[in-house]
Image (cartoon, rainbow, N blue to C red):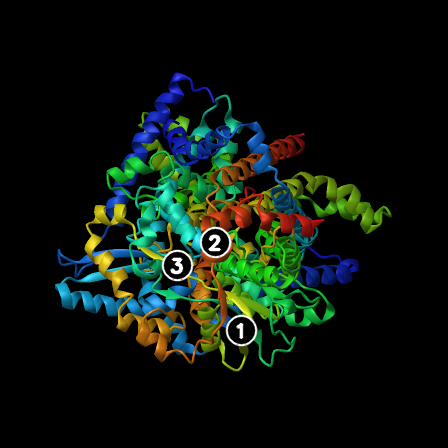
Amino acid sequence: MGLTLAWLSLIVLIPLSTVFIRAAGLGVSEFIEVGFSSRAIAAYKVSFGTALAAALVNAVFGMVVAWVFVRYEFPGKRIFDALIDLPFALPTAVAGIALTAIYAGNGWVGQFLEPLGIKVAYNPIGITIALIFIGLPFIVRSVEPVLADLSAEVEEAALSLGATPVQVFVRIILPSILPALLTGFALALARGVGEYGSVIFIAGNMPFKSEIAPLLIVTQLEQYSYAGATAIAVVMLLISFAMLLFINLAQAWSRRRVDA
Amino acid sequence: MIMPGRWRNLAVGAIISASALAISACSQGSDTPEDGKEAAAEILNVSYDPTRELYEEINPKFVAHWKQQTGQDLRINMSHGGAGKQARAVIDGLDADVVTLALAYDIDEIAAKTNALSEGWQKRLPKNSAPYTSTIVFLVRDGNPKGVKDWDDLVRPGVAVITPNPKTSGGARWNFLAAWAYARKKFGSEAAAEDFVGKLYANVPVLDSGARGATTTFAERGIGDVLLAWENEAFLARKELGEDKFEIVVPSISILAEPPVTVLDGNAKRHDTEAVSEAYLKYLYTAEAQDIIGKNFYRPTGEAAKKKYASTFPAVNLVTVDGDFGGWQAAQKRFFNDGGVFDRIFAEAKK
Amino acid sequence: MTIRSTHTTASIGLTVVALAFLGIFVALPLVTVFVEALSKGIAPYFSALVDPDAVSAIKLTLTVAAIAVPLNIVFGIAAAWAIAKFDFPGKSILITFIDLPFSVSPVVAGLVYMLLFGMQGWFGPWLREHDFQIIFAVPGIVLATVFVTFPFVARELIPLMQEQGRDDEEAALSLGASGFQTFLRVTLPNIRWGLLYGVLLCNARAMGEFGAVSVVSGHLRGLTNTMPLHVEILYNEYNFVAAFAVASLLALLALVTLVLKSILEWRLGYAHRSAGH
């Protein structure tokens, strides 16, 4: 117990508190000025917008993936199953250069999209794709165990009573997996908002357009603006903490539902 | 956060164990090289992005030179990155003996924020402490398909320009000022210059954080029609990535870039490397080093090398920061600091 | 699980959609890394890997993981033990704090250590006086790595230990076993597969961390460059084959991790299917 707290404070709490103490030295008006400058707000919007878009895409497709892996058998299933966790294991910088090589205008996929007027790399779509990669396992791995517990008999009964598949999904499946889905969604979102390594290679980094908040912290540091860097860091920290709290509440809620 | 007694004890314990961890990790980190004779010296040169190839060639030459002069073995460690990032790392404690950065402002910042360096540093070595100079040129794709001849062409609609972010990249600041100098001369007012530079940045699709990143974006990823680049970087890109793929266009006006070098006395004194650090930088002015400098597409300052490489470097009408912008302190404050002209341009562009 | 015949069209459709999604977003980047690395043939690939700077980057990465992972194992077990076996107020806040590094941007993680140990930070000048280097040296990289990998082991063990309850331990204790014996003989065997699983994820992240390490490293070639940072440097030197070669080594590592993980999952049985992450 003591060890836990000591180590926790040593590695996490004390270091994180420095940001707050530094930021507290700024004063309210200065904090708002640097932490919520128009460029910073634009960066938060890019970070949240792309993370949200990626989490939504992952919520839909992650659910499909989870469903397929729980309910169906097909050749090579184990290999694909292992592949789902690749984003956990693959270093983000490696993902970043690989994705850039694929989606840049002269890349494998980019060269086919460019003539269609779709530019993926160096704008928010590229960031979203990187975040889809990063976030996928969060959704799949959260939803999978719940889906596995769901008995197919209930669905079959509903179908035999004349319900359409859509009705079955909306009335039976969705309500049971919703808490898990939300948890996965929030985890993917939280991770996406802070992601740096895989994004900077593909982002383009234009202020107001494709500059993510973590990059803005780095940029602020590079122009000797510790105040700016800490203010943005504090805003991001508070947001992460709020999201985590939400996740843990959602988990508690889902546990209660399962128990009931 | 109010700390009750128990927590305070924990915090104290935490700090103690932190130090213990740090100490153990330090001893882990400071492995001496196996061949390490006691007298071997080690210096760290913190530099900016495009000098990688230059110092890769100069360092072994100087190591040999130093060995011959003093009999001492020397190891030169290098760190490269965007100039702002590098200067900031030095301010945060990156233990450099010498810095060789893209512009004087970054070294001024080191002088102001640490006690490693005195303010008059730029007077200590010849030629404003700049053993080599460069300028800003345009790199375009083979055959110059967009017909880019001068700065005017960069603001035409449909011409995509690649340049790094002047907030973080030294080279990008030179780019910005060169464009400004051109517009001010051509249109005759500061307001017109701001308008011109604003239009230029409206044509920029990717803003990398360093010069090298911008070159990669342009050359390897095929984004953009024109790269605003260091002259040396433009030559190097042609050499590394294909002479038949790119052409260099020299604009009618550009800027004299003087990347300065200096010894960080405070650090060198602590490491006892003052003599070797100073000898290292002085070596950059020798005929041997100047020749390597010319070979790596930097403009040499030594007469012999200047003559030898005269055909490589076209004569350009060059403005200077000191003469035309009142020095780096003034230029930085006016153009690049938060709330400066560059921020205004981007805030405008958003609307 | 049976597939009802009426669902066949739908099931095939969904399977195709799922696999296509996985293929495009997950498998393709992996394949790219290897194709780009080998694009100039085998010889440049291997010469990139035996380059002295690459070798020292590999060594550094291994060293950092070898320090960071054991530290987090000890902590992870202790934290999971405390949370699963004891009741105390503020438990869920504690769990949230343990999770925090998971959602804190790696850049912020690097920044906080910079603020603590940098020359402009609290302890920087003192450290310099006493000739300790933390930031821009190996200790800083280790600290940043420990931070980002902090929750992995604990997060894996907490649900597992909660599920197992404390009956076994209480029985052992009442039979006269010491606390340490109980841990070694009763608790550890119960959690060993989950522990291994957490260690695996922790190790993968420790070796692959980029953002946090990038802030505190200083990028000294041959000294403070980890493998992911070396990838970036090579990439910036137009040395794309070498960059992807080092990247492929990291990708290989990721694949080994996945294989081991699949084996562990099989051993753990389907019951424990990482609800945490």
Residue matched to label 1? B250
x, y (%) of residue B256? 46, 64
2 and 3 marks on the same chain:
no
Farthest front residue in view? B188
Which callout, 1 or 3, points to the residue nearer the camera?
1
Compared with residue A101, is residue A181 higher up or lower down, i.e. above or below? above
Q: Residue at x 46, y 19 (%)?
A: B2
Please tell me whether mark 3 sits on a helix, a strand or a loop.
loop
Give residue B80's mark.
Answer: 3
x, y (%) of residue A66? 65, 52
Please tell me whether mark 2 sits on a helix, a strand or a loop.
helix
Amino acid type at mark 1: Val
Are circles 2 and 1 on residues that touch, CB within 8 Å? no
Residue A215 appearing in the image = no
Are circles 2 and 3 on residues that touch, CB within 8 Å? no
x, y (%) of residue B282? 26, 62
1 and 3 marks on the same chain:
yes
Q: Nearer the viewer, residue B67 or C202?
A: B67
Which callout, 2 or 3, points to the residue nearer the camera?
3
Q: Answer few, some or many: residues within 10 Å of disc 1's Cα (few below 14, many 20 plus, some between 14 and 19).
A: many
Q: Residue at x 64, y 51 (%)?
A: B345
Residue matched to label 2? C261
Asked which quadrant contains residue B100, the reply is bottom left
Q: Answer few, some or many: residues within 10 Å of disc 2's Cα (few below 14, many 20 plus, some between 14 and 19).
A: some
Q: How far apart are the alpha carbons under marks 2 and 3?
A: 38 Å
Q: How far apart are the alpha carbons under marks 1 and 3?
A: 27 Å
**Dot 2 falls on which chain?**
C
Q: How far apart are the alpha carbons under marks 2 and 1?
A: 57 Å
Are circles 1 and 3 on residues that touch, CB within 8 Å? no
Amino acid type at mark 2: Lys
Amino acid type at mark 3: His
Please tell me whether mark 1 sits on a helix, a strand or a loop.
loop
